[in-house]
């Protein structure tokens, strides 16, 4: 089947009521016919729902759809994207293990790597995505257990070569984990390029309307089993209602990403000619440093555009304050266009040196381009640039 069909047709088993739309299973637990069935379920001799912290029909449906879209053997859904990231680390790593990570990662992921995991004897090394595969290879030590990378990165939109990283991970016997949040499985499928796991904040493009939070990790069955064991006891479970919303959202993900990407490309192409900007970055612009890699592993450039406003942080703030249509919020992937100043919001916990090392300059603005008429989005960005001079 085509990629989008399973996202629409996969659903939980119908109840005796024969509903067409799956109901929300708002229940904390599930009943058993007798004591023997209950014993067998807790002994993992039979597969069935026991408790919604473990599994729930709505959550299972959402995970099954994500596995279909990513081409994965198994998956596990969590309450937030950061819970999925942390569960991947905590479920698979032990004292003495080492992670090689791309330097350009989300601010909260940076906090986990630099402040939380070291408390449990897990260390990391950073590599600049632009350094190429030699930089990644040089960072691997005998203690390295995992390579972790965002691609495209947030907010600088750097692109990692997944084919090269997949080959490196296989050759060195380490796991490759890809944060695929910015592309979604519609635009990029890391498991096809050698990744072992693909992680998402479902709060972003997967939900697509800024309504609920969720996270999911999919990939190799034996790895997901370890993550499930960690999560079953520690409890970062996705709620049934949020899973129901996210599963419904997947039915339109392919259509939405097509519009996000076409609108974002139009915005990027328009802004490249602006004398008010120092740089415009979008994966499918020929000026992008990793343009060829992006074209090879992504079907389109996604919904984010990053640009640097001339005049630094003061001009950047004036630009944001002058916007009339675009929303000012820290989220992304919404139907509505959103503008964010990463240095003072999503990546504020990084030091100035750490931000500059990943291209987050004081004047950098990230725009998550929505589904509005593109002429209206462009007009708002243009008037804000003029007003901020």
Image (cartoon, rainbow, N blue to C red):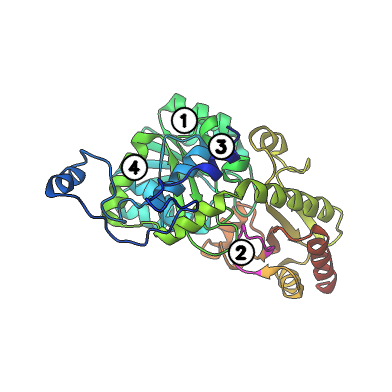
Secondary structure, mark 3, is loop
Of badges 4 and 3, nearer the viewer stands 3
The answer to which image quadrant residue 344 occupies is bottom right
Q: Give the image location of residue 194, x and y in percent.
A: 50, 30
Taking 116 as reference, is 335 left or right? right
User: In the image, what residue occupies the spot 63% across and 45% down?
Assistant: 254
Could you give the CA–CA distance between mark 4 and mark 2, rounded to whole angstroms? 31 Å
- Label 1: which residue? 169
Q: Give the image location of residue 173, x and y in percent.
A: 40, 28
Taking 18 as reference, is 30 left or right? left
Of badges 4 and 2, nearer the viewer stands 4
Q: Look at the image and give the residue range highlighted in magenta.
A: 328-338
Q: Residue furthest top?
A: 171
Where 194 falls versus 252 (above or below)? above
* Badge 4 or badge 3: first in the primary sequence: 4
Could you give the CA–CA distance between mark 2 and mark 3, rounded to whole angstroms? 29 Å
- Label 3: which residue? 189
* Badge 1 or badge 3: first in the primary sequence: 1
* Mark identifier at residue 92: 4
- Label 2: which residue? 343
* Badge 4 or badge 2: first in the primary sequence: 4
Give the quadrant of the N terminus: top right
* Magenta stretch secondary structure, dominant: loop
Where 197 falls versus 243 (above or below)? above
């Amino acid at each position: 089947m085509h990629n989008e069909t399973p996202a629409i047709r996969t659903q939980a088993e119908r109840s005796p009521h024969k509903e067409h739309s799956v109901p929300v299973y708002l229940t904390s637990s599930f009943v058993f016919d007798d004591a023997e069935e209950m014993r067998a379920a807790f002994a993992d001799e039979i597969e069935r729902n026991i408790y919604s912290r473990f599994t729930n029909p709505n959550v299972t449906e959402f995970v099954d759809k994500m596995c279909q879209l990513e081409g994965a053997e198994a998956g596990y859904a969590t309450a937030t994207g950061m819970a999925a990231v942390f569960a991947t680390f905590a479920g698979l790593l032990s004292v003495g293990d080492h992670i090689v990570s791309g330097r350009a990662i989300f601010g909260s992921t940076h906090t986990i790597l630099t402040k939380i995991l070291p408390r449990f004897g897990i260390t990391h090394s950073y590599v600049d995505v632009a350094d190429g595969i030699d930089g990644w290879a040089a960072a691997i030590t005998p203690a390295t257990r995992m390579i972790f990378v965002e691609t495209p990165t947030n907010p600088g939109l750097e692109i990692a070569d997944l084919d090269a990283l997949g080959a490196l991970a296989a050759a060195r016997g380490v796991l490759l984990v890809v944060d695929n949040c910015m592309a979604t499985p519609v635009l990029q499928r890391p498991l096809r390029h050698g990744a072992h796991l693909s992680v998402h904040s479902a709060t972003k493009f997967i939900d697509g309307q800024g309504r609920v939070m969720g996270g999911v990790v999919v990939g190799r069955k034996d790895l997901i089993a370890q993550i499930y064991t960690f999560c079953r006891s520690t409890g970062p479970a996705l709620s049934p209602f949020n899973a129901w919303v996210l599963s419904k959202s997947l039915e339109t993900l392919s259509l939405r990403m097509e519009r996000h990407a076409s609108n974002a490309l139009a915005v990027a192409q328009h802004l490249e000619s602006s004398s008010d900007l120092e740089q415009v970055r979008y994966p499918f612009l020929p000026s992008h440093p990793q343009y060829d890699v992006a074209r090879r592993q992504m079907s389109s450039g996604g919904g984010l555009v990053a640009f640097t406003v001339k005049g630094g942080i003061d001009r950047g703030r004036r630009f944001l304050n002058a916007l009339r249509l675009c929303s000012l919020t820290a989220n992304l992937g919404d139907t509505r266009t959103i503008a964010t100043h990463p240095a003072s919001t999503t990546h504020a916990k990084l030091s100035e040196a750490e931000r500059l090392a990943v291209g987050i300059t004081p004047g950098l603005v990230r725009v998550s381009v929505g589904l509005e008429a593109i002429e209206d989005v462009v007009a708002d960005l243009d008037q804000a640039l003029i007003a901020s001079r």
